[in-house]
Image (cartoon, grey):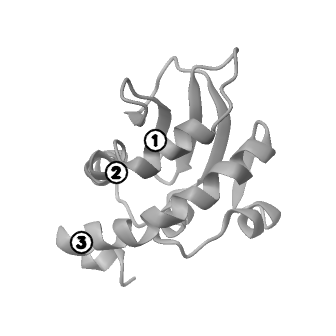
Amino acid sequence: MPVFQSADELYEIYDEFFKLVKGSEEAKSIMRSYMKSDTHNALVQYIYHKPEAKMTWMESDDGGIDVVFGETDLNPELIFEMDVDIGHKFWLGEIELTPALARKQIESKGPLSKALKVVPQLKIWYPKYREYLLNTGRNELVIG
């Protein structure tokens, strides 16, 4: 059984979590380290399967990250595609990007060199995601 039973459940949890971190200094640091492309208006899109969902990041007006859930006309430079369970484990810090790419647990499109520069900065959010789930009574998502 998948971690999230519907796209709506995923959007609700990720929306509330990213509200906590998207304007943080870490988010601003990620956006500062990202070399913007002239042909893309978003940094990354996460495409999830089982259930089907999408999450796209773009720069916010304050230099942090805005998150768009669902279908969008944004044109992301990086795309990561994976099952929802893999994505959830990634945000918990239980799966690292490079081995997951090698095992085809995560498929990527776009310049991987940019992804490898940004992803290490996300590690500071892994314990925050776990803490968020525990604080909101979603212990079953942490202790699976």
Q: Determine the residue positioned at 36% across, 84% down.
A: 143
Residue for badge 2 = 21
In the rendered image, the vertical position of residue 96 relative to residue 82, given as above or below: below
User: Local crowd at mark 1 within 10 Å, few (<14), some, or many (≥20)?
Assistant: some
List the residue tagged with mark 3: 138
For the residues labelled 2 and 1, say whether their Cβ atoms are less than 8 Å apart.
Answer: no
* Residue for badge 1: 28
Q: In the rendered image of this protein, does residue 117 appear above or below residue 141? A: above
Q: How far apart are marks 2 and 1 (CA)?
A: 10 Å
Front disc: 3 or 1: 1
User: In the image, residue 64 lies at what x, y percent?
Assistant: 41, 37
Q: Residues within 10 Å of mark 3 (few under 14, many from 20)?
A: some
Q: In which quarter of the image is residue 127?
A: bottom left
User: Which quadrant would residue 69 be assigned to in this image?
Assistant: top left
- Residue at 24% from the left image edge and 75% from the top image edge: 134
> Residue reaching furthest bottom?
143
Q: Where is residue 17 in the image (x, y as percent from the top left)?
A: 30, 54
Q: What residue type is labelled 3?
A: Arg
Q: Which of marks 3 and 1 is nearer the N terminus?
A: 1
